[in-house]
Amino acid sequence: MVDFFSNVPDIVIDTILEKLPIRMAAQTSVLSKQWRQAWLSLQHLRFDSGFQEQQKNKDGSCDWRKNSRIISSILLHHRGHVRDFILYVPDDADEDHMNLSQWISFLSQNGIQKVIISNWDCKVFITPYIFRCSDLVYLSLGNFSLNPPPSCFHGFPKLTYLSLVDFKFSRPNIFLSLIENCKMLATLRLDTWSGMDHVVIDSPRLQTLIIKGEFDSLAFRNVRSLKSISLCLKTMPKKVLTVETVDAINHLASSCQLQSIHFEGYLCQLLAAGGAVRSPPVTFNHLNELRLSNLNLSKFDVFRYLLSMIECCPYIKKLDISVIPGEKVGLGGHIFDLNYKYKLDRLRVVNIEGITGSSAELKLVEYVLAISASLENLFFKSGKCDTDSERKMSRALMRFPRASPKASLVCLDT
């Protein structure tokens, strides 16, 4: 008889353990002598929400103090390098028993490459030991405060992904100095922050940029490699966007080769009010995908800005638009300003969501159908309206002429 468990190759054991929750990986130590210490060499340590769920007491409560001791014990007995460290801090965690400094200090000496820490309640300062993790490739932190890096910090030389969510910056210039020292950064996500009103992006190798929050101004210094950008203003800012911000966004057309743009929230409304529609307009010659979300088309400036953005992207293949309820007002004589001679020869797919049958929404669909010579599918989803109104709107849409003989209108279920 062959003892299967005692003769499994080490590489197979490592692969199996990496796919198991850490508690179950520890239980494999009873299989044989070969397995007894194997889990202590795990390179991927995941203390995620699943780990916290498994450690709950019989009454459903979570003893964070006990969980913290378990994490400390595992790190104390760990052997070899740690590649990934994922930590979920629940909302009922006790700040006094979060040994984060000790954990990060240990990881910084063991070749850590990926750190994900989701902290849902106690906003504390991230430990300065994080700046000693010189091998980091992926860093995602949520709900922390950030002090200036120590003087010995010269950046994360290998970092390609950085995500900061619900952050508080003790000084406005911390963020800029941080990303300036990450020379290999390719993806940056900044979502909800305080302590910084003026956002400056300076990262020559950055390819994907996601910004969601509140800001008074936005500037781009060196983003020549940028391919995808998503900007969202979650609330109306106290100040109107400056001309410099509008110019900064328009400057992206010539400073990089953007392939995807997503503007969301109040940004389109403020760009329209700030003079983003100009003559002559900018042109995004490399753009494949354009997404504009939460548009109030009852405002003529927003409607005009939407059409201007479409005409600034002559080579797009996909167009996504979502609208929010507004007053069902007519556009008056403005509808005759539409340029039906303009053509989109590469547009294949259009998604329009939230329409209720206003004249502005219908005019938008009519215009897109009239200028899209290669359109294959226009998907639309109605917003909150009664069945009769939805039926009338669908009939009106179906009657519009189409520049593309292959164009199909598809109504999606709400």
Image: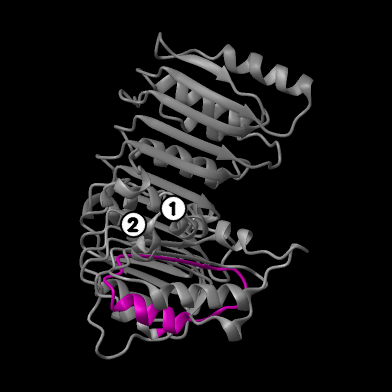
Marks 1 & 2, CB-CB < 8 Å contact: yes
Find residue 140 and name its label. none
Q: Residue at x 30, y 46 (%)?
A: 8
Q: Which residue is mark 1?
A: 31
Is 173 within the magenta?
A: no
Q: Quadrant of residue 238?
A: bottom right
Q: Quadrant of residue 75?
A: bottom left
Task: Bin the neighbour count of mark 2 within 10 Å (Cα to Cα): few under 14, some 14-19, many 20 and up.
Answer: some
Residue 112 x %, y % = 31, 69
- 302 and 183: which is toward the camera: 183
- 256 and 28: which is toward the camera: 28
Magenta residues span 100-127
Residue 371 x %, y % = 40, 22
98 on left or right of 84:
right
Find residue 34 and name its label. 2
Kindly give the residue lying farthest to the bottom in the view shown. Answer: 151
Amino acid beneath label 1: Leu
Amino acid beneath label 2: Gln
Q: Residue at x 41, y 78 (%)?
A: 76
Location of the C terminus (image quadrant): top right
Task: Bin the neighbour count of mark 1 within 10 Å (Cα to Cα): few under 14, some 14-19, many 20 and up.
Answer: few
Residue 289 position (above or below residue 161)? above
Location of the N terminus (image quadrant): top left
- 228 and 44: which is toward the camera: 44
Residue 105 position (above or below residue 85)? below
Count of labels in the image: 2
Q: Residue at x 47, y 35 (%)?
A: 320
Q: Residue at x 55, y 55 (%)?
A: 266
Q: Secondary structure at mark 1?
A: loop
